[in-house]
């Protein structure tokens, strides 16, 4: 247990800021998840998975309200995260979205179908 | 530039979002598979009767094995009767992939609700995504 060991990811057009909200791990995204973001994002979500295990998090919240777009390669990093957490016991995952970003509703619906009952989408 | 162009023409936010996503995925597909040479991107709006249609097309050279794999994937995708079920299967399969996601084109068809077509000529592949758009602001 203890505090967060996960740091901030800062790129020119993409970033992630972590926080703890009680037993929840909250990751706040901003910018555009394009080709430049693919590798850093995949590595970051690997570390986030370790953090979830270390903290025995009750929930993971991905806050996408300031995320303008995400390509399919970035999307795949979330598929891997969801699969890894399923194998590790299935922590609930919440995506917090902004209805003004229309792609979020369409894209995240596929992740909800991937882990029905465990992945929820909040507007 | 393409985003700005489409923003000025497409009146509905969801349609704009679908076109942006498809353009992004097609261009990234070119970046991933291109074997050099000239790459092209073409975005076109036209009327099919009263219905506005947007067409996004990329063309690029692709090396032999990559071209075969890409064409196999495209044919399977185009023949899938249920684009969403195909996309869901591709998503599940992507979890164990080490390289690439293989999701971009399936995403265009399922999430973007677009028809995909392609043609190959002399090692060059042209991929087109096409869809009706609800609201277009025509110039003039």
Image: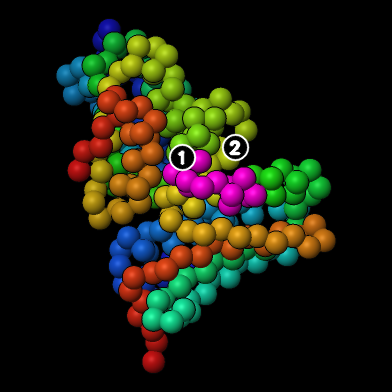
Q: Quadrant of residue A78?
A: top left
Frontmost of labels 2 and 1 is 1
Label 2: few (<14), some (14–19) or many (≥20) C-alpha neighbours in 10 Å? some
Name the residue: 39% across, 87% down.
Answer: B139
Dividing the picture into quarters, in which one does residue A26 lie?
top left
Residue wearing tag 2? B100
- Judging depth in this view, the residue of A51 and A5 nearest the camera is A51
**Residue A81 x, y percent position in the rendering:** 42, 25
Magenta region, residue range: B74-87
Q: Is residue A111 left or right of residue A58?
A: right
Q: Position of residue B20 (x, y in %)?
A: 44, 60
Residue closest to the far front: B81
**Magenta run includes residue B84:** yes
- The answer to whether any part of residue B1 appears in the image is no
Q: In the displayed structure, does residue A71 sit left or right of residue B27?
A: left
- Residue nearer the viewer, B92 or A122: B92
Instruction: State the predominant SS element of the stretch in magenta.
Output: helix
Residue holding disc 1: B85
Q: Nearer the viewer, residue A35 or B53?
A: B53
* Mark 1 secondary-structure assignment: helix
Q: Give the left or right position of residue B34, taking residue B94 as reference.
A: right
**In the image, what residue occupies the spot 47% across and 59% down?**
B114
Question: How far apart are the two marked residues, 2 and 1, measured between alpha carbons?
Answer: 20 Å
| Residue at (29, 12) in percent of width and height | A55
């Amino acid at each position: 247990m203890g505090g967060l060991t996960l740091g901030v990811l800062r790129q020119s057009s993409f970033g992630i800021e972590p926080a703890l909200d009680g037993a929840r791990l909250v990751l706040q995204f901003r910018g555009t998840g394009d080709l430049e973001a693919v590798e850093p994002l995949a590595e970051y979500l690997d570390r986030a998975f370790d953090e979830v295990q270390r903290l025995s998090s009750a929930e993971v919240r991905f806050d996408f309200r300031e995320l303008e777009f995400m390509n399919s390669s970035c999307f795949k990093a979330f598929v891997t995260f969801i699969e890894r957490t399923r194998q590790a016991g299935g922590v609930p995952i919440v995506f917090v979205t902004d209805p003004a970003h229309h792609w979020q509703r369409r894209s995240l619906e596929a992740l909800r179908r991937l882990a029905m009952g465990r992945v929820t989408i909040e507007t | 530039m393409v985003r700005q162009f489409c923003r000025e023409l497409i009146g509905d936010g969801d349609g704009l979002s679908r076109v942006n996503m498809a353009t992004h995925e097609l261009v990234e597909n070119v970046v991933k598979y291109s074997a050099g040479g000239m790459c092209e991107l073409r975005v076109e709006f036209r009327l099919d009767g009263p219905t506005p249609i947007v067409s996004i097309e990329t063309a690029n050279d692709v090396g032999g094995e990559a071209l075969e794999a890409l064409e196999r994937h495209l044919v399977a995708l185009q023949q899938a009767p249920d684009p969403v079920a195909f996309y869901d299967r591709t998503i599940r399969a992507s979890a164990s992939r080490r390289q690439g996601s293989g999701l971009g084109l399936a995403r265009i068809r399922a999430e973007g609700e677009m028809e995909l077509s392609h043609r190959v000529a002399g090692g060059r592949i042209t991929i087109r995504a096409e869809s009706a758009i609800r609201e277009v602001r025509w110039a003039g």
